């Protein structure tokens, strides 16, 4: 595995040299910006590959460094911000994950899946009010998703609001039954038995 990483590093430096050469050469010769765009896209692609390899090997800090290099090239890459947020979640650095997910929303306010991620992260750190707020935002866009009501029920349960928890669990149960979501339905029913319903 070390040999593969070493080879990839050599390839990266080769591309970085090529990138530098093409960029300076293009400016000197006044060649079209399309070549620069292509080179930048290739460079982003290389850093994405490195990040993926590092993640597969549990080298989260190196993956973070690769994502940051992509963001140096293209700071408006919502996909990169999202992956960076997920990597911070893997490191249990939830505040940085939240900042990344919020950046995704700034870039792409229509990416409603981020509401779900933010709801989950806030529940993990015990900020139940914000967790509920984001899960509710998600449920407005996905009112037929039983999992979001199940998650809301769990957060209300953690916040010791048992009545609200049961209410959300019953909504989740009915939707899961309608949709034939057998495993989710079983989980909900088991939980309702535990909390005395």
Image (tube, rainbow, N blue to C red):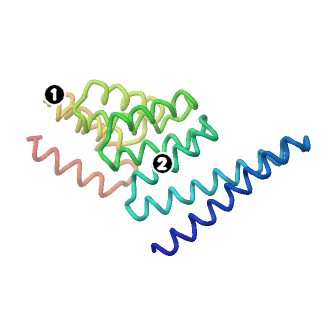
User: Residue 62: percent from the left, percent from the top?
Assistant: 44, 54
Q: Is residue 143 above or below residue 61?
A: above
Residue visible at 78% across and 46% down in the picture: 23
Q: Secondary structure at mark 2?
A: helix
What label sits on residue 78 in the rendered view? none
Residue visible at 49% across and 34% down in the picture: 112
User: Residue 101: percent from the left, percent from the top?
Assistant: 45, 35
Q: Quadrant of the N terminus?
A: bottom left
Q: Is residue 194 left or right of residue 37?
A: left
Residue visible at 59% across and 39% down in the picture: 72
Q: Secondary structure at mark 1?
A: loop
Q: Is residue 178 left or right of residue 166?
A: right
Distance from Cα at disc 2 to Cα at disc 1: 41 Å
Dot 1 alpha-carbon crowd within 10 angstroms: few under 14, some 14 to 19, many 20 or more:
few
Name the residue that disc number 2 marks: 65
Most foreground residue, 183 or 39: 39
Dot 2 alpha-carbon crowd within 10 angstroms: few under 14, some 14 to 19, many 20 or more:
some
Q: Quadrant of residue 128?
A: top left
Looking at the rendered structure, the number of numbered marks drawn on it comes to 2
Q: Are marks 2 and 1 in contact (CB under 8 Å)?
A: no
Q: Quadrant of the C terminus?
A: top left
Please tell me whether mark 2 or mark 1 is closer to you in this view. Answer: 2
Name the residue that disc number 1 marks: 161
Question: Which badge, 2 or 1, comes first in the chain's sequence?
Answer: 2
Most foreground residue, 62 or 86: 62
Q: Quadrant of residue 9?
A: bottom right
């Amino acid at each position: 595995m070390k040999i593969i990483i070493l080879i990839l590093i050599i390839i990266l430096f080769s591309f970085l040299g090529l990138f530098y050469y093409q960029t300076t050469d293009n400016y000197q010769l006044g060649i079209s910006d399309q070549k620069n765009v292509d080179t930048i896209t290739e460079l982003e692609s290389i850093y994405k590959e490195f990040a993926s390899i590092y993640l597969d090997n549990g080298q989260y800090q190196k993956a973070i460094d690769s994502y940051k290099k992509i963001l140096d090239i293209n700071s408006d890459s919502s996909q990169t911000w999202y992956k960076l947020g997920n990597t911070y979640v893997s490191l249990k650095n939830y505040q940085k994950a939240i900042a990344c997910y919020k950046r995704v929303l700034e870039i792409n306010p229509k990416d409603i899946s981020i509401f779900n991620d933010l709801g989950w992260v806030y529940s993990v750190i015990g900020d139940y009010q914000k967790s509920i707020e984001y899960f509710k935002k998600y449920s407005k866009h996905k009112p037929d998703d039983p999992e979001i009501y199940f998650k809301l029920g769990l957060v209300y349960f953690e916040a010791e609001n048992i009545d609200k928890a049961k209410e959300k669990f019953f909504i989740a149960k009915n939707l899961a039954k309608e949709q034939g979501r057998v495993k989710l339905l079983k989980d909900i029913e088991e939980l309702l038995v535990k909390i005395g319903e």
